[in-house]
Image: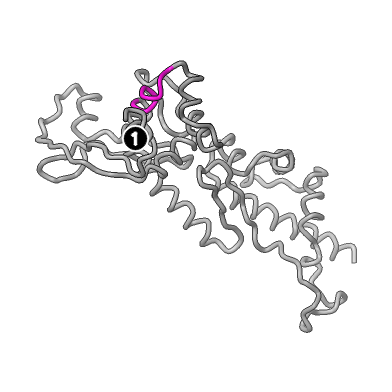
Amino acid sequence: MIEKNVRFSLDNLVVAYNVTVNARTNKPIREYKVDDNGVVTEVKSEGEQAEMDLGIPADKVPTKEETEETDRKLIDEFICSGLAPQYEDLPFDFQFILKRFYDGTRYAKIAADLNITLGELSVMLDEYRKRVAPLAKKWDDWRQNQETTVIDKPEEAVAETVAGEVVEFIELGDRKSSGNDEKDPSPDKEDKGTQIGKDELENFILGGYGPTFEDLPYDFKELLTRKRNGETWMEIAQSLKISSSKLSADWSEYKKRVKAFLDGEENGAA
């Protein structure tokens, strides 16, 4: 029966946790903000900030506890993203633990590798999920806003896997005509800019021939090389400490300018 209860705890579909709220306003005492890289931090209240900066004691605020529930899958995605904080009293790498689990390793095997019992793993994982749940909700709001912003742009969209481990840009605007449309213009009348295909454009950039622009400071030859060597755009964006949507927008703008540069050279040669 104990083992059955442990399995149920680990696989529960929702995580219930307590939130301290202001009894007067019914708003949570702890508020959070998310930066451009998806990092969630706590926002100090005016009273706490004054206490820190000026040494003025914060006003006593009547509080009460309320129970909230969050989808466990959402919390696990947040943990697997690598953005969840660590706590000294919960010393295990829960990101690694959950990635192993989603890769097919049973919790019992993970617990044995950590030299703890399945029950101990269950208790610690449950406690960790509860602590990061409010941050996960805030992160999810930010993530959905980022996805909406990117999808609304005409030249890009984002596809995302369950655990948020692989994020790729689906770049529109590089599509070539099938050649079967009766309305396709003949080659001698077609705009030369449309003749520059994706492979030709990227090979030009990889050759180090692309122009540079002050407002686009990244080395796109290096970034494209990293992408072709197996890194995802999300991983590259995180290494640059910028959001994936920011990198996507800059990459699309850079390609557009290089296309215009090549088109100008061809027209000049003609």
Q: Nearer the viewer, residue 205 or 148?
A: 148
**Which residue does the numbered mark 1 point to in the structure image?**
9
- At horizontal 35% and vertical 31% (from top left) the residue drawn is 6
Q: Is residue 69 left or right of residue 36?
A: left
Which amino acid type is marked by label 1? Answer: Ser
Q: Nearer the viewer, residue 159 or 242?
A: 159
* Count of marks, rendered view: 1
Q: Nearer the viewer, residue 118 or 42?
A: 118
- At horizontal 32% and vertical 40% (from top left) the residue drawn is 15
Instruction: In the rendered view, tell whether residue 29 sits above or below residue 257.
Output: above
Specify start and end residues of the magenta stretch as a single range.
116-123
In the displayed orientation, state which residue is furthest to the right: 270
x and y, in percent, of residue 38 in the image: 45, 40
Check disc 1 and report its element: helix, strand or loop.
helix
x and y, in percent, of residue 184 in the image: 78, 79
- At horizontal 81% and vertical 50% (from top left) the residue drawn is 204
Q: Which quadrant would the N terminus be assigned to in this image?
A: top left
**For residue 217, what is the image quadrant?**
top right
Q: Is residue 237 left or right of residue 148?
A: right
x and y, in percent, of residue 210 in the image: 77, 48
Figure colour scheme: one colour
The overriding secondary structure of the stretch rendered in magenta is: helix
In the displayed orientation, state which residue is furthest to the front: 1
Q: Is residue 47 left or right of residue 189?
A: left
In magenta stretch: residue 208: no
- At horizontal 48% and vertical 40% (from top left) the residue drawn is 37
In magenta stretch: residue 120: yes
In the displayed orientation, state which residue is furthest to the top: 115
Instruction: In the rendered view, tell whether residue 104 sits above or below residue 201.
Output: above
x and y, in percent, of residue 94 in the image: 45, 28
